[in-house]
Amino acid sequence: MAYKYGNVEITFLKHAGFKIKGSKTIYIDPYDLPDGLEKADYIFVTHDHFDHKDIGSIRRLSKHDTTVVIPSGCLLEGYRTCELDIGEEEDLNGVKVKTVPAYNIDKPFHPKGIGVGYIIEMDGVRIYHAGDTDFIPEMKDVEADIALIPVGGKYTMDMEQAKKAIEVIKAKVVVPMHYGTLPETKADVEKLKSDRVVVLEPEFK
C-alpha cells in the first residue's frame, strides 16, 4: 500500500526499492521487479551493486525517454543517463535532485566517495533516500519531509545505528528499508515504530 504525503505517493517495493508517484513517476533502486509495472520517467540508482543497479528491472521500467540518474563512475550503457557527482544538484524538468554521501564507516562494502544518497524534491515534497550507508556525520545536514533509511545491518546501518540516524536527520517521517530481502539483513522493524517512523509493507517479496 502506498503512503501519501501531500500530492506524492510512496510505495516500498522491496529491499531498497521505492516508487515515488507525483507529477512524474520515479523509481529508486528497483530490484527484482516483475513485468507490467508503470513505466518510469526517472530511475535513480545509488550505486553499482547488483541489488541496486538491477539491469533487468531498469529495462522493464524504462520507456523511450526514461532518464536513469547515476553517481559518477557508475557505468550504464544503452540508456539515457544523468551522471552526478557527490554534492551536485540538478533540475530534471521540475524534479530537483541533490546527491549526498553514502558510505560505510566500519565495513568494506561501500567505500566513501563511490555510492550516493539522493534528496529528491517533487511537487513540493522532499524525499531523502539514504542509499547503502552507515550512520554518518553528514546525516545531520539532511532536511527532508520523508527519509528512507537502511536498517538491516551487515552491509548498512543496523537498528541501533538507525535509531541514532533518526535522531539527527531533520525529517518529518522516516521509513525503514534495506531489510528482509537478503537473509543476512533481517530486522524487527516494528521496534522502530513511533510518531515519526512509518513501517511500510513491501509490495513484492
Image: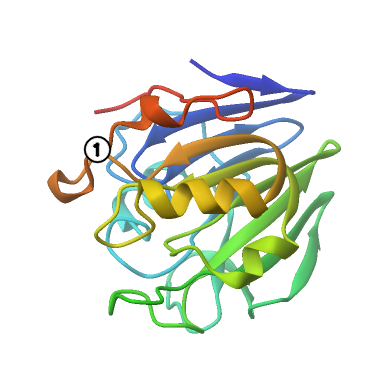
> Where is residue 196 drawn, in percent x and y?
63, 29
Residue with the mark numbered 1: 180
Q: Position of residue 80 (x, y in %)?
A: 57, 65
Q: Nearer the viewer, residue 41 or 165?
A: 165
Front residue of this view, candidates 75 and 186? 186
Q: Amino acid at mark 1?
A: Gly
Q: Residue furthest top?
A: 1
Above or below, comparing residue 25 to residue 168 in the picture: above
| Whether residue 90 can be seen here | yes
Q: Nearer the viewer, residue 151 or 50?
A: 151
Task: Please report the residue visible at 62 percent of the width from the left and 44 percent of the height from the top.
Answer: 147
Badge 1 crowding class, 10 Å Cα cut-off, few under 14, some 14 to 19, many 20 or more, is some
Horizontal relation, residue 5 to residue 199: left or right: right
Image position, residue 202 (x, y; %): 37, 27
Depicted 62 relative to depicted 107: above or below: above
Question: Relative to residue 163, is residue 197 depicted above or below?
Answer: above
